[in-house]
Amino acid sequence: MTAEQENPMIADQEKLMALDTPAGEPSGIELVNVTKRFRGGVVAVKDVSLSVQPGEFVALVGPSGCGKSTVLRMIAGLEEVSAGRVRIGDRDVTAELPQHRDVAMVFQSYALYPRMSVRRNLGFGLRMRRTEKGERNRRVAEVADVLGLEHLLDRRPGALSGGQRQRVAMGRAIVREPRVFLMDEPLSNLDAKLRVSMRAQLSLLHKRLGVTTVYVTHDQIEAMTLGQRVAVLRDGTLQQFDTPQRLFRYPVNLFVAAFIGSPSMNFVQARVADGAVSFSGTKIPLPAGSPLAGADRSVILGMRPTAFATGSANGWPTLRVVPEVVEELGDERYVIFDVDAPRVDTEETRAAVDAQAADDALLLPEDRARFTVRLPTDPPIDVGETVSLALNPNRLYFFDPDSGAALGPTPEQDSSAR
Amino acid sequence: MTTTATPPPPASVAAPATGPEPADGPVRIRSPWAGYTTTARYIILFALVCVFLLPVYVLLITAFKDLAQVSPSRMWEWPDSLSLDTYRAVWPKLQDGLRNSLAMAIPAALISSFLGAANGFVLSKWRFPGADIVFPLILFGMFIPYQAILIPMRQTISDLHLLGGLNGLILAHVIYGLPITTLIFRSYFTGISDELIDAAQVDGAGMIRTFLFVALPIAVPAFAVSVIWQFTSAWNDFLFGLVLTNPDHWPVTVALNNVAGGQVVPYHEAMAAALLASIPTLLVYILMGRFFMRGLMAGALKG
């Protein structure tokens, strides 16, 4: 990695503040019952309705092949919709060519024009829109200054590092001052460290410019950190569209629950009866106001890795487990153990887990549920030695074993408990 | 944070790993027979090169001989003197043909390459319904033998009032070159990222400006291949030139044929004329061949 690459994208905050904001009010985006059927019959997007507020930063997230890029390309006009309408601002753009939609897009591969200098790459969109030359040069210079590209303006993309190319791709979008930014996994070709710093820069940039942004990623952490609201897609259908906090706390189904959060939520087949849920010999009283209070049924029980604590603190129900793997991360540790209960292996959890790491398939076939929990570094925990873990009864998630739909918690229930 | 951290190894296992001693200087991995096989390989290659270059050798030495020295039985012999008289003798006979050929082959190669680029772009990057039917139909043109279409083509060119001059010949070569140039450019553009074309569209360029400003500049290597191919085939063509033009506009291939004509074949003149006639195609290879090697796409995509 060159020293250049480590430079932050925005070299100077003051320059950023001086940057032109797009004229006029930002535009919202509205997808109404949008469906995409490809030639050959594959349905990539099914009846998606999504409304992005003016100036909002929305992340589209889902496993590969879920149709998130297709949604973005339909907003850009690079794909025709098979059914439904696309609106940008107060205009119906469903039948409009991409060049007339006034959107700017940042591509995963950056898609810089290889035979043009950085200057001409940045100015291409303005040139195509017949912006007057003096104005074009002024805007290119301004954006190059903010992104720290001034000294690279006469180079070709081939002579740039990965981070610099990424900045040029970003600059090419900013310089246009469009109504909408569309970003298709713009950070996925950067190395992990640069990606994290770029993420923060992107947030900053959005705050400053206030342009409506739709951001596609397969990385749920990226989606959660960047998006003011996050749309989770699976197999072309919109699962849930909400703020990151609410996605995390109130997932509507098993897929969203398994997809959001890292490490993933732990699931186990359990039984609700007499106001308590039990699995593997552990009985946990249902939280106050639970809609399942009077039920007698089997459920899938979900627990976040952070819902556990060592010891038997707070009078929480405890679980006696034998750690199989302990992963030390410095200021915390992940403890992995088996639970004496059947494993939850629905299509939904598998799809969600596959999305996070394609290699996450089990090395050894397992028929027992396996939990990953996050614990503080003390007291020490040894592999193979039984420990008891306390489980926060207010952080349980319930799902219907057949439909995968969430049975709780609900926001109403949380507010009544408070 | 992913869960890839591993616990520290127990102390008892943590024996220091000592690798093999580092060698002095670089060490090459090679089989014990490498020396012999390499030598044998070069000997075989050299022998094959000699075989392939024999005709060129005969052409070169014969062109320097005079009429008395030329005979099939003495064809391997070195010329008595390296005189350029033969070249001086054939030059006037070829002059007009060379000029005609240049005036015909250069526009024919450029126009058919440009049109092929447009075809290839549309067939690979700006797809329209039916593109999968149109492309094989265009390709089909490559497999039609010249002789089969000669008479209708002459009639068509005549109906267009282009018969006799160079323009009719250029038109014939442009059209006959389109299948192969379309194939070259379609293959080339297929290998180029779609995102580049998408980016141009989002940036506000329509089909024609995307082609001219984004696709065509990237296609320089394909353009070189196509121009070399088209120039060579137009230059080397004899049949079209003979049938479609009048003697004032005969290309060099027809002139070359006339040098070799007559009762006695003046081999030395034929060889000298052949050498002169092949210089332009050689130059095209030398000047444009380097574009084959260049990675002109460097930097478009992720690093």
Image (cartoon, rainbow, N blue to C red):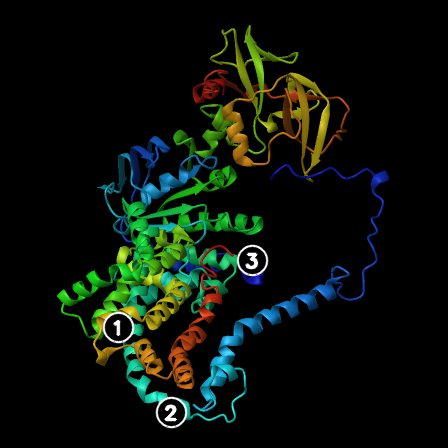
Badge 3 marks a residue whose secondary structure is: helix
Q: Chain of mark 1?
A: B
Residue A48 position in % (x across, y down)? 34, 31
Whether residue B170 appears in this view of the structure is yes
Question: Does label 2 lie on the same chain as label 3?
Answer: no
> Of circles 3 and 1, which is in front?
1
Q: Earlier in the sequence, mark 1 or mark 2?
A: 2
Q: Are marks 3 and 2 in contact (CB under 8 Å)?
A: no
Badge 2 marks a residue whose secondary structure is: helix
Residue type pointed to by label 3: Glu
Q: Say which mark, if any, is on residue B242.
A: 1
Judging by the rendered image, the residue that carries numbered circle 3 is A6
* A4 relative to B47, above or below: above
| Left or right of A76 in this view: A112 | right
Q: Nearer the viewer, residue B287 or B85?
A: B85
Question: Does label 1 lie on the same chain as label 3?
Answer: no
Q: Residue at x 51, y 18 (%)?
A: A398
Q: Residue at x 49, y 66 (%)?
A: B293
Q: Nearer the viewer, residue A348 or A38?
A: A38
Q: Chain of mark 2?
A: B
Residue A326 position in % (x across, y down)? 71, 32
| Quadrant showing the N terminus of chain A | bottom right
Q: Chain of mark 3?
A: A
Q: Nearer the viewer, residue A376 or B172?
A: B172
For label 3, the crowd category at 10 Å Cα-Cα, with few meaning under 14, some 14 to 19 and many 20 or more, is few
For label 1, the crowd category at 10 Å Cα-Cα, with few meaning under 14, some 14 to 19 and many 20 or more, is some
Residue type pointed to by label 2: Arg
Judging by the rendered image, the residue that carries numbered circle 2 is B88
